[in-house]
Image: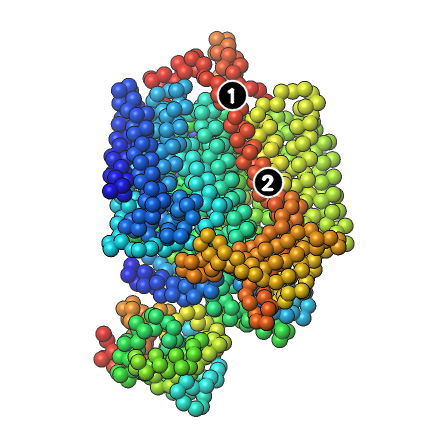
Amino acid sequence: MGNNQPSVLRRFMPLIVFVALVILLAIGLTLNPRLVPSPLIGKPAPEFELPLLLKEGSFSNKDLMGQVTLVNVWASWCFACRQEHETVKFLSRNGVRIIGLNYKDEPDDAKNWLARLGNPYQDIAADYDGRIAIDWGVYGAPETFLIDQQGIIRHKVIGPLSDKDNYDALLLAMKSINPALNKSLEK
Amino acid sequence: MIPELGHFALIIAFAVSIVQSIVPLIGAEKNNATLISIARPAALTQLLFVGLAYAALTHAFIVLDFSVLYVSQHSNLVQPLMYRISGVWGSHEGSLLLWSLILSLWTIAVAVYSKNLPEILMARVLAVMAMISTGFLAFMLFTSNPFERIFPTPLDGNELNPLLQDPGLAIHPPMLYMGYVGFSVAFAFAVAALLGGKLDATWARWSRPWTTIAWSFLTIGIALGSWWAYNELGWGGWWFWDPVENASFMPWLVGTALIHSLASTEKRGVFKSWTVLLAILAFSLSLLGTFIVRSGVLVSVHAFATDPARGVFILAFLVVVVGGSLALYAWRSATVVSYGRFQWFSRESALLLNNIIFLTAAAAVFVGTMYPLVVDAFGLGKISVGRPYFDTMFSLVAIPLLLLLGVGPAVRWKGDDWSRVAKVMVLFFIVSLVLGLLLPFLVEEKLNLSTGLGLAGALWVALTTLKDLFSRLLRNLKLPLSYVGMVLAHLGVAIFVVGVTVVTSYGEEKDLRMVPGSSYNISGYEFRFQGVRKVNGPNYVADEAVIEVWHDNEKSGELLPQKRVYSGKGNPMTDASIDKTLFRDLYAALGEELGSGAWSMRVYYKPMIRWIWLGSLFMTFGGVLAVSDRRYRQSIKQKVNEKFSVTSRA
Amino acid sequence: MNKLLLIFFLFGVLTLSLKSVAAPIETFKFDSPETEKVFHKLSEELRCLVCQNQNIAESNADLAKDLRLEIYTMLTQGKSEDEIVDFMVERYGDYVLYRPPFKPMTWLLWFGPVIIFVLGLGFVVRFMKSQSSDEPPASLSNEEIERIKNLHAEQDGK
C-alpha cells in the first residue's frame, strides 16, 4: 500500500484467513449446533425423591445405585419418545435396568400411553413440574442417562435411542463400564 | 403453466448468465470489441428473464396457486394481498429469486450508466457480476427451485408466518438485499481493476457512487429490521446480536470503511490496495451472511429452514467467488500501488485509522459470532456468545471511533498542523465532557459514567460537525452535496448514540397483573387499565386491551395492545401498542387472561428510542445526498478517456 | 445427514409447543426493585436451550418458563446472582450463558478484538514510518504538470 510493494504476507493474509474460515465452516456443516453436552458426566446423579407413577411410594437417587441403570426421560406428549420406545423395550428385554422419568406429563395420559405401547421400565418416577429434570440438565425429551453401579452419570443420550448413532454411542459407554456386556444388545 | 414458464425463464437466464460471464471477459483480455459488446445486451436479456420468473412467482402467489409448493407453504386463502406479494420473498427459495432480480437490476444500472467507462473495464465488471448471478441461478435451479410443484394440490396453504405479516418487515428484505447485492458492484469493480492491473483515482470515482448507494440501502434495511423487531416482538428490544443480524452488520461496518477509503483513493490516490481489499471483503461478508442464514451452522431465530446440503453449495460458491478474488488479490495487488504521501497528522492518516477501527469492529462481531463454532469444531464443548459480549466490545470500539469522528473531518489532506485545530478541539472536548457528564448527574444526582460518556461522545461529534459546517457557511464557501451528505451522516451517528445511551440507561419495564380499573405509574406516566374487548381483523380475531395513559393529570393517549389469533395455525401473537413521540415511547404488550377479569401485561417507558432510527435515517439520507453530488453526474472528459484506452494493461 | 435432520425435527417438536409468538409476561412479585432488576438481568443473560437463539426472558418455551420460575424461587430464597448462574452452569454447562465466561478457552474471544486493534495500530505506525523514509518520486516534467493541472481542475477541491 505504500511506495513499497506489499509484502508476500500482506498479500496472502486475507486468503489464508479465508481458507481457515472455509475449513471451519465445512466442519460446522457436520456439527449440530443445537446439541448441548451435559456437564454432569462423571458426577453423581442429582439427589431427588419423586413419587412413583404406577404405584404407591417414591423413588430416590439412592435407588439408582447397585446396578448399571438407564434413566429414560419420556412423556406421552413427546412424539420421538414413541419412536424410540421399541428400542427401550428391546434394551429392557435384554436385561438392562431402565428407570423411567416421566417429564411434565399428566398421570392419566402417561398411564394410557404405557398401556398402549408397553412398559419396559422397572420403575417410573413422575416429575410433573419438571423441577427434578432441571437438576439433571434435561432440556427436551427423549433423553437417556447411563448410571453406573456407584450412581455416577457416565453418558447422556440426547434424542431418541432408536437413532443408530445414539444407540451405538450408548453401547460403547455401557461397554466401558462392563466389558462383558450382553452380546444380544448389539443391534 | 405459468410456473413452468417461470422455471424455463430461469433456465434461459442461467444460460445467458454463463455467456455474460465468459465472453466479455475473453473480449477484454483479447481487446476484441465484438466480444465485449455482448455484455450489455446479455445483461438486459438476463434482467428480462429473471424478471419474468419473478413475475411468474408473484402471479402464483397472487392467484394463490397452491399447486406450487412454495406458495402452499407461505400463503393461505385468507391472506391479504399485500402479504401475498411480500410472501414471495418470505422464505428461502423466493428470497433467492429476489436476490437474482435485484442483482440483474444493479447489473443493468451499471450497464446503462457506464457510457463513460472504458469498454474493457465495463466488460470485466459486467462479467464478474454475471458470474455471481450464475452462482445464484445455479443454486436455485439445482437445489432450491421456487417453482417446484406439489401433487395433489392442497385445498388451502399454510399462512405466511404472522410475524412477517407486517409492512415494516415486508419491506426489510428488499432493502437489505439492495444493499448486499449493491456491494457486488464495488466487488466487480475491484476484481476488474485487479484483472486489468490498473487502479487509480478515476476508478475510485466510478466505484464510489455505487458503493454509497448500496451502503445507504443497507443502512435503511438494517434500521427497518431493528424498528420492526421493537414494534412487533413485544420485548422492547431493538437489536439482539443474533448471528443473522450480525451477518448484516458486518458488511455494513466494512462498507462504511469502504466508502471512506474510496474517498481517499479518489481524492489523493492513496489506500488503493486497501480499498480493493475492502470492496472484496464487503461483498464476501454479504455472501457469508447468505451462508449463515441458510446452512444451519449457527443457531438463529432468523434462519430459514436450514439444510446442510444447501450449506455445502453456498460454501462451494464462497470458495469460488471469495477465494478466487482473494487469490487474485494476492497475485495482483502488487500492481495496485499507491504513491500518495501524507504526514502523521493528516486527513489520510485519520481515514487510515478509521479503516482500522471499523475493521476492528467488524472483526469483533465476526469473532463473537464464529467463536461458538470454533470451540465446537475443536471438540471443546459448546459455549454461547450473546449480547453482553457484543455490547461490551462495541462500547469499547465507540470510544476511538467517536473521538476520531470529531477530529478527522477537520484535518487537512496531506498534512496539517495540530496547533491550527487544537484550540477549538480541546475546547469542544472539554465542553462535551462536562455537559455529557452533567446531564445524567442532574437527573440521577450521582455520577453515571457510562451514560455521561455516551452523551459526551455524541455531543463531541455534533459540536465538531456543526462547527465545521458553520465556519464554511460563514466564509461563504460553496457546500457541495457530498459535504452536506457527510454532515448529515455524521450527525446521524451522534443522534444514534444519544438514542442508544438514553434508552439503555433510563428505559424502564414492568410486568403487571392488572384488573380493570387498576393503574400503574412509570416515570410520571400513569397507565390505567380499562378492560379487554374482542376485535376482528382480516385474518385474525383478537383480544384488545384498552389502557389510558395519563400525564400531569391529563389524558395524553391510549394504548390498545392486542392478543391475536390468526386463522392459519391458530398460534397466538402479540401486537404491542405504542404511544410514540420523538422523545419517548410508551409501550404496552398484552399477556394472558389470569382469571376473574385480570390480565397480565407489560408496560415500558422508552425515552429517546426513536433517535436510534432517526440517526439511521440521517445516515441513509446523508449517503443519498452524497451520491447526488454533481461531480458524479458530470461526464469524464475525453482526455481522461484516452488515457484508459484499450491498450492499457500493466 | 439424516441424523441431523432427525434431531432438528425432534427438537422442533418441543419448540412447536410455543404458546404464543410474543414476549412472555410473568407476574412475579418481588421484594424490592433491585431484586426485580436482577431477575430481568439473569433472564436476559441466560439462554433458552430449546430455542433458536433466545434468552429465557423472551422465550415462550416450557423450559424457559420453568427456568424463570426457578430463578424467581432462588431469588426469593435470597440466593445471589452468582449462585444462580453457577446453578445453571452446573446443570447445563457454559452454553447457557450468553455472557461467555472468562477462562483460557475464551481468552481469544475476549482479547481478540483488542489484539486486532493493536495490530492494526502497529500496522499504521509501520506504514507511516516507511513512508517518511522513502525516496520522493522523481520530479515531473512541465508538460506532465500541465496535464495534471488540467485533470485536477475537474475535481472539486476540499
Residue drawn at (45%, 50%) of the image: B164
**Residue to which mark 1 is pinned:** B631
| N-term mark: 2 or 1 | 2
- Nearer-the-camera pick, B71 or B444: B71
Q: Where is residue B124 in the image (x, y as percent from the top left)?
A: 34, 27
Q: Where is residue C32 in the image (x, y as percent from the top left)?
A: 68, 68
Closer to the camera: disc 2 or disc 1?
2
- Which of the image's four quarters has the N terminus of chain B? top left
Task: In the rendered view, tell whether residue B499 sits above or below residue B26.
Answer: below
Residue extending furthest toward the bottom:
A56
Residue drawn at (39%, 14%) of the image: B642
Q: Which colour scheme is used?
A: rainbow
Asked if residue C135 shows in the view, the reply is no
Task: In the rendered view, tell whether residue B47 sits above or below residue A166.
Answer: above
The answer for which chain carries disc 1 is B
Please indicate whether residue B620 sits to the left or right of residue B106 in the image: right
- Amino acid at the residue labelled 2: Gly
- Nearer-the-camera pick, B50 or B268: B50
Total numbered labels: 2
**Residue to which mark 2 is pinned:** B615
